[in-house]
Amino acid sequence: MPVEIKINNRTAWVNLRNQNGNLLEVEVDGKIYQVDLFHTSGGTFSIIENGHSYNIELVPQKQPKKYTAYTLYKSYEVEVIDAETRYLINRGSNGTMSSEKTITSPMPGKIIKLLVQEGDLVKKGEPVIIIAAMKMESVYQAPVDGVIRKINVKEGDTIEGNQVLIEIE
């Protein structure tokens, strides 16, 4: 499953395609790289890619999955947003961003209970769906006042990450 990595102002989608010991096949924004990655003591990584050697030191910040990466000449602020992080971010915002009129699940899961039907009038913050993911049940709320325009799932369905579940107009 790809992870989103933010490096300063750039965002990259990274997917580990294959691993054999220290030899990795990594996909970054659709481009495939063959790398030899070695984790040395103290958070330093030695990376060889296409005959070039890079050394990077990752220093964890106070927030989980945030680091400062140091190379020989530069430093970068790095944030790793994997499925767990995306789930926790979206769970804190009830599965939506306030300007959106859709409800999505940030990760795969199962629909436990639909609390609304198409045509129902909902108020912002009203519970509309319960999803089980990562051994937890989460209640997702309406992000806005409106009418349930479309429900794209039914109880018992297995869902994918970022799948649109409910649309509100």
Image (spheres, rainbow, N blue to C red):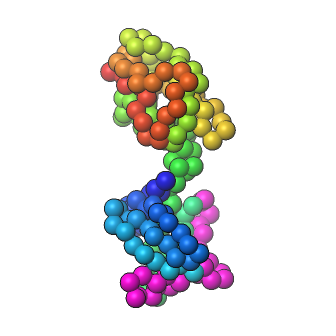
Tell me where residue 154 appears, x and y as whole percent.
Answer: 49, 21
Horizontal side, residue 3 vs residue 22: left or right: left
Seen in the picture, residue 137 relative to 124 is either above or below; the reply is below
Tell me where residue 76 appears, x and y as whole percent.
Answer: 45, 73
- Give whichever of 46, 92 is nearer the camera: 46
Tell me where residue 70 appears, x and y as whole percent.
Answer: 50, 80
The residue segment tinted magenta is 39-64
- Residue 14 appears in which quarter of the rendering? bottom left
Q: Is residue 75 part of the magenta span, yes or no?
A: no
Q: Main secondary structure of the magenta part?
A: strand
- Residue 44 appears in which quarter of the rendering? bottom right
- Give whichever of 70, 1 is nearer the camera: 1
Tell me where residue 80 appears, x and y as whole percent.
Answer: 51, 60
Q: The C terminus is located in which quarter?
A: top left
Residue plotted at (36% across, 29% down): 101
Q: Is residue 158 visible?
A: yes
Residue plotted at (55% across, 63% down): 66
Q: Is residue 59 part of the magenta span, yes or no?
A: yes
Residue plotted at (59% across, 67% down): 61
- Give whichever of 76, 45 is nearer the camera: 45
Seen in the picture, residue 86 relative to 51 is either above or below; the reply is above
Residue plotted at (36% across, 33% down): 100
